[in-house]
Amino acid sequence: MTIHQLSIFIENRSGTLIKVLDALKTANIQIIASTIADTAEYGIYRLICSEPMRACEELKKAGVAVALSDVFALEIDDQPGRAADVIKTFSEAGISIAYLYSFLLRGKGILIFRTDNTELAVKIIEDNQLRSISEESLQGLA
């Protein structure tokens, strides 16, 4: 029910992001979604891609500090307030969202997020019949 996300640690200086992007380009790996959270000295570049395991290997070969983590990907209707409804469901169950990013894909909203309680999140997704996206279906979109 979770998918793999790459978390890449990059310094806040010219050229560090392009090293990551060039390594993925050379490996012919498609980026599906990404976000950067930064501090004064470094950033965490989180991304969902077509082949996360191979991307992790290729980035390590290129000398990039990278880690794989499990996150949830939910498909929601592209309607005002739908993301709020979904997140409220988790909040009411006492689940905190560590971080979230979203995008639109083929007329649907996609929420990517990490929680503090994976087991309970899985139960909430199942009990509320939320549409979880598998890694295989994301690969088909790339």
Image: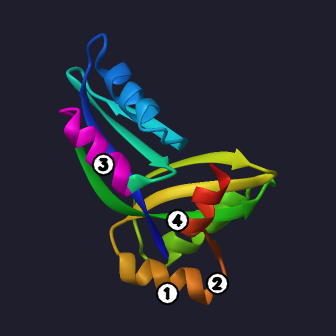
Q: Position of residue 30 (x, y in %)?
A: 53, 41
Relative to 101, 21 lies left or right: left
Give the magenta range: 53-65
Q: Amino acid at mark 1?
A: Lys
Q: Secondary structure at mark 3?
A: helix
The nearer-to-camera label among 2 and 3 is 3
Query: What's the distance in space between the residues labelled 2 and 4, CA to CA?
Result: 21 Å
In the rendering, which numbered label is found on residue 128? 2
Residue highlighted by disc 3:
56
Q: How much space separates mark 1 and mark 3, taking CA atoms?
A: 29 Å
Q: Residue at x 64, y 55 (%)?
A: 110
From the viewer's perspective, is the residue at label 2 or at label 4 nearer? 4
Whether residue 2 sits left or right of residue 10 in the image: it is right
Task: Determine the residue located farthest toward the top in the rendered image.
Answer: 14
* Front position in the image: 21 or 74: 21
Separation of marks 4 and 1 at Cα, in angstroms: 19 Å
